[in-house]
Amino acid sequence: MKTIKYKALLIALLVGLSTFTMAKSAKTLDDDANMAINKFIDETPGGDPFLVKAKAFLVFPDIKEGGFFVGGKYGEGVLRHKRKTLGYYEIMTASVGFQMGIQEYSMIIAFTSDAALERFLNENDEWDTDVDGKIAVAEWNSKEELDDVEFKDDMVAFIFDSNGLMGSFTMEGTKFKRINP
């Protein structure tokens, strides 16, 4: 009985989060992605050469996340190679555990190897990070330039332009799905 309540609460939360950002046009997603990339480049020394060197990168200009024991996040974004759009994706996460708060932020996930990009592209329009790979959140000294930092992971995430507060210790699963805006 409790699992049914948790599932219903989780579905309601995900639907609520997704209605904030759903139904964006391709042009709007591209424009928002361009603004997020420019902000990332302005705030991150070496950010532009790093993105050019990456095999490809996902840009999620506006991810909304919230939770109170049960949580989720949702955002829509663009897959880019250099500056060319390859497709549009959504990110959806469900989580359970000790968590509380709400936040929104931008995120860029850079694919640093051909193998990681191929795995992502060949997953029949859906990709689950818990099954196929892990994404490392980038850590570097803000005085270092990104092109001087060696990331040993195939996928590196950069979170920036964050608003709100979210504290958590949870188990979660993240799914990426190709969309047609």
Image (cartoon, rainbow, N blue to C red):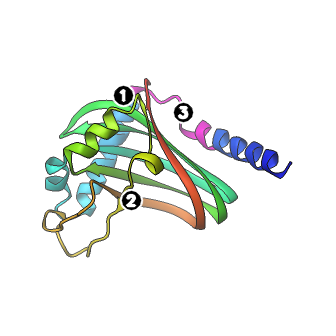
The numbered disc on residue 27 is 1
Task: Say which element carries label 2.
Answer: strand
Marks 2 and 3, Cα distance to the nearest angstrom? 21 Å
Q: Residues within 10 Å of mark 1 (few under 14, many from 20)?
A: few
Q: Which residue is mark 2?
A: 159
Task: Tell me which amino acid carries mark 1.
Answer: Lys
Q: Secondary structure at mark 3?
A: loop
Q: CA distance from mark 1 to mark 3?
A: 14 Å
Towards the viewer: 2 or 78: 2
What number is the disc on residue 136?
A: none
71 on left or right of 148: right
Q: Tell me which numbered mark, 2 or 1, is placed earlier along the sequence.
A: 1
The reply to whether residue 82 is in sight is yes
Residue in the foreground of this view, choosing between 117 and 87: 117
Residue located 57% across and 66% down the image: 165
Upstream in sequence: badge 2 or badge 3 = 3
Q: What x and y, as percent, mark residue 121?
A: 32, 34
Q: Give the foreground label among 1 and 3.
A: 3
Residue 93 in the image, given as x and y percentages of width and height: 55, 48
